[in-house]
């Protein structure tokens, strides 16, 4: 099975990279680590906002109202015993 990167994988990498870069800048330069992590934390928040609201996981708001059949719920998450 071959794995390919998707948009949300890249968003997670960008979040980690921006926070790591903030820590690296704070450690390697005279800029306070709290300042650099806070500023690049805002960049991470921008990635999160874009992933949630600009390019969200659903195409239309109507998709949020679709009911899920009990058979589609994984057994681990099912609150009801299955008929199996």
Image (cartoon, rainbow, N blue to C red):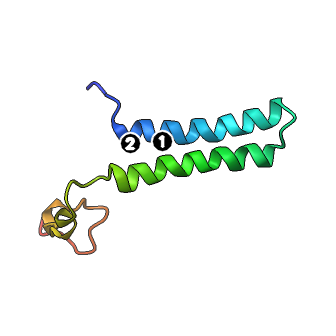
Q: Residue furthest top?
A: 2
The foreground one among 3 and 9 is: 9
Tell me, yes or no, whether the two marked residues, 2 and 1, touch with CB atoms within 8 Å. Answer: yes
Above or below, comparing residue 4 to residue 26 in the picture? above
**Residue 52 placed where, x, y %?**
39, 55
Residue occupying image coordinates x 16% and y 60% = 72
Which is more toward the observer, 15 or 75? Answer: 15
Residue drawn at x 48%, y 41% as measured from the top left: 12
Which circle marks residue 23 in the picture?
A: none
Find numbered disc 2 in the image and state the secondary structure of the residue it sits on. helix
Q: Secondary structure at mark 1?
A: helix
On the rendered structure, is 58 left or right of 9? left
Looking at this view, name the residue that lies furthest to the bottom: 80
Q: Position of residue 67 (x, y in %)?
A: 15, 70
User: Horizontally, is 21 left or right of 45 in the view?
Assistant: right
Instruction: Point out the image quarter for the N terminus.
Output: top left
Residue identifier under label 1 = 12
Can you identify the residue that label 2 sits on? 8
Indicate the quadrant containing the C terminus: top left, top right, bottom left or bottom right: bottom left
Residue 49 falls left or right of residue 24: left
> x%, y% of residue 66?
15, 67
Local crowd size for mark 2, using a 10 Å CA cut-off: few (<14), some (14–19), many (≥20):
some
Q: Residue at x 54, y 42 (%)?
A: 15
> Image quadrant of residue 61?
bottom left
Looking at the picture, does residue 18 appear above or below residue 46? Answer: above
Are there few (<14), some (14-19), or many (20+) residues within 10 Å of tag 1? some
**Up-down relation of residue 67 to residue 74 (above or below):** below
Identify the residue at the far right of this view: 30
């Amino acid at each position: 099975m071959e794995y390919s990167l998707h948009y949300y994988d890249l968003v997670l990498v960008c979040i980690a990279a921006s926070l790591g870069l903030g820590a690296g800048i704070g450690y390697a330069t005279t800029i306070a680590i709290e300042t650099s992590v806070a500023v690049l934390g805002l960049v991470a928040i921008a990635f999160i906002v874009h992933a949630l609201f600009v390019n969200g996981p659903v195409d239309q708001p109507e998709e949020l109202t679709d009911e899920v059949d009990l058979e589609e719920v994984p057994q681990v998450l099912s609150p009801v015993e299955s008929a199996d």
